[in-house]
Amino acid sequence: MITTYLAVSALDMNLRHLGIPVLGVTTNADGSFTVQYAPSATAGQIAQGNQIASTWPKSNFQTRALVPIRNDLNALPLAKRQAIFNDLWAIPSGQAETRLLLDNGPNAPAIWSFYMWNEIGILNSTQLTTNQTYVTCLYVQDLPYYLVNPPFDPTISIQGLEPVS
């Protein structure tokens, strides 16, 4: 499902993805952005956040369509795709469900369906890989920064957002 984000929301998501401790971001009357930092933010994080905010586009963003995300995934070597699948099917520390099933975005119902096909065990290896790819596309739409330099492989960079055209 294509979701539209105000520029300020996309900036907030990006800063949080980068690990910068922010309390929030606001849009000023002139269209620029002001970032409110958590007390734990270091001087370096504040400088980085302010630099990003000063150059952040003022236009809205939307999630990318599924086909371009799938094409980007399919362009990755199999080992990188497998690392993504392993991360999505893993149970994060302190959780009772896989990362996939913790998604509560608009694609969550579809993700559950594809997940169950995977778990039932009736898919051959080609179907399984295709199913995992589709689930990953849906997940990236719900969490657009998930595959932007993820901790399990920082060399992967698949954007989940694009400017609204």
Image: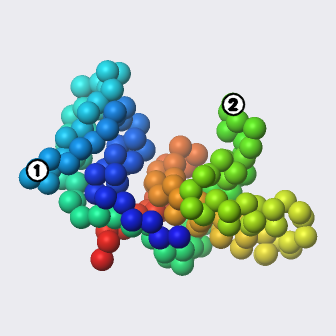
Task: State which mark lies toward you, 2 or 1.
Answer: 1
Does 14 sit left or right of 47 as displayed?
Answer: right
Asked which secondary structure carries label 2, the reply is loop
Q: Which labelled disc corresponds to residue 94?
A: 2
Q: Quadrant of the C terminus?
A: bottom left
Whether residue 27 is situated above or below residue 124 in the rendered picture: above
Residue at the (24%, 25%) spot, across then down? 43
Residue at the (69%, 31%) spot, across then down? 94
Residue type of the residue flagged with mark 2: Gly
Residue 39 locus on image (x, y percent): 32, 21
Residue at the (73%, 70%) spot, across then down? 131
Residue type of the residue flagged with mark 1: Ala
Q: Which labelled disc corresponds to residue 105?
A: none
Looking at the rendering, which quadrant does residue 93 occupy?
A: top right
Residue at the (68%, 66%) spot, across then down? 110
User: What whole-number distance in Å separates the C-alpha atoms at marks 2 and 1?
Assistant: 42 Å
Residue 58 locus on image (x, y percent): 20, 60
Does 43 sit left or right of 5 as displayed?
Answer: left
Q: Residues within 10 Å of mark 1 (few under 14, many from 20)?
A: few
Lower sequence index among marks 2 and 1? 1
Residue 79 locus on image (x, y percent): 66, 60
* Residue identified by numbered label 1: 29
